[in-house]
Every structure is written in C-alpha cells, then in structure tokens.
Image: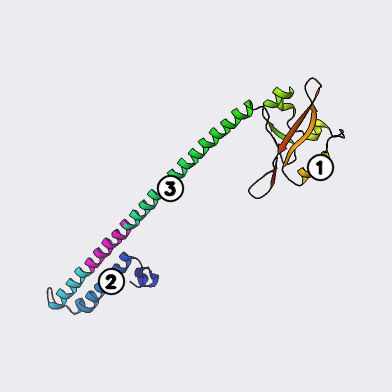
Amino acid sequence: LIGYLGKGDWTREPFDHWLVIALIVGLIGQAGYMTFSMRLFDPAFDVAHGLKIVSYGCVLIGLMLDMIVVQRSLEATAHQLAYAKKTLESEIAFRRHAEEAMVESEERFRVFAETASDWFWETDAELRFSYFSTQIFNVTGIAPVDLIGKTRWEIAGKGDPGIDWEAHLNDLRQRRPFRNFEYKIKTFDGSEVWISISGSPRFDAEGGFLGY
C-alpha cells in the first residue's frame, strides 16, 4: 500500500486507483475489526469479512475499468491506423497518377521533339550541352552525342565578326532569357549553316541556376 501511494500512479490508472482502495478497505477490515473478533461469525468477524468482500469487489471494478480504457485505446489506435492507411492509399494513388501523367507528357514531348522542324536543346549550369533532340541530326547531319558536353562557342567558334557573341554571353552570365540569337556552325560535310536559337534559364526550388 505504501509503495503504491509513493508511486503516485494510482491517481491516474484505473486499476491502480481501485487496488489502493481495495488495500485500504482490506486493511481497515483486518486491523480495525478482525483484531477485535473473539470468535467466528461474531459482529466484528462479519464486518471484517464483509470488508474483505468489498475489497475484492474494488479489485474487480479496477480490472473492468482498466479493460474499458484499454479497449477504447485500441479502438482509437485502430481508427488512427485506418485513417493513416486511407491517407497513404490516397497519396500513393495521387503519386501514381502524377507519375503516369509525367510519363505521358514526356512521351508527347519526345514525339513532338522528334517530328518538329526545329530541335530542342538543354545545357547544364556550366552552359555545356546536356541534351539535343534527334532533329538536329536531320538538319545538320551532326549526331547529338558529338555535341554533348561542349559549349555553344566551342562548337561554333567566336571568330566571326558578324556575330555579337559578347551580347549573347552577357545574357548568359546574367541568366537572362534570349531569343533569335543567330550564329553559324559547320555541318558533317564541312559546309556552314546559319541557325537561330532561343533559350530560357532554369532554376531549382532554392533559386540555384541549372542551365538553359
């Protein structure tokens, strides 16, 4: 009894609460009445015996209340798990739909890039080409793999006085979009062809430059 009172948990836990009451009732019955009993079934004996039965009842009440608390806790946990499961299923379905939409969009872009009269390109943060659509081969005869990793001025050279490379490079340094920049490159057979390109800068979520 002293140990339970010292813990303090008996004020919060139903079983411990009723167990302390049972111990107190039993102590009263044994110390307060049984010590004064002179024979079986005299009034003091009957009171002590009745108090012992009451103490047993208190333990039973504590067990029942504790079971009710556990049952409610299990029901609440089951409800939370069901809600979490439903939320997870919804998120999985949303992500699957988003991934399918992305794949479909990428496929549409691929078909468009392969059939368009112009070509698409991308550069990394160091302004080196990281992607060309296959249409560039149909126009220039140059395979995209031969251009990947190079800068635009490495491919074209900056010696032609008719091309304003400085203005274009300034746009790139300032991460500005540009339109209709014209320069010429050599095709696979050595002939020169003028091309006109446009580009927009790309940034990540933190504003870091990713390329054009």
What stretch of residues is rendered in magenta? 55-71
* Residue tagged 1: 167
The correct choice, above or below, for 75 with respect to 91 in the image is below
Q: CA distance from mark 3 to mark 2?
A: 45 Å
| Residue at far top of view | 189
Q: Earlier in the sequence, mark 3 or mark 2?
A: 2
What mark, if any, has residue 87 been given in the picture?
3
Residue 142 seen in this snapshot:
no
Q: Is residue 146 magenta?
A: no
User: What amino acid type should be assigned to the residue bearing mark 3?
Assistant: Thr
* Residue tagged 2: 21
Residue 109 seen in this snapshot:
yes
The correct choice, above or below, for 138 with respect to 38 in the image is above
Q: Residues within 10 Å of mark 3 (few under 14, many from 20)?
A: few
Q: Main secondary structure of the magenta part?
A: helix
Q: Position of residue 160 (x, y in %)?
A: 86, 33
Tag 1, which secondary structure? helix
Question: Is label 3 in contact with label 1 (beta carbons under 8 Å)?
Answer: no
User: What amino acid type should be assigned to the residue bearing mark 1?
Assistant: Ala
Question: Is label 1 in contact with label 2 (beta carbons under 8 Å)?
Answer: no
Q: CA distance from mark 1 to mark 2?
A: 90 Å
Q: Position of residue 139 (x, y in %)?
A: 72, 24
What mark, if any, has residue 92 been given in the picture?
none
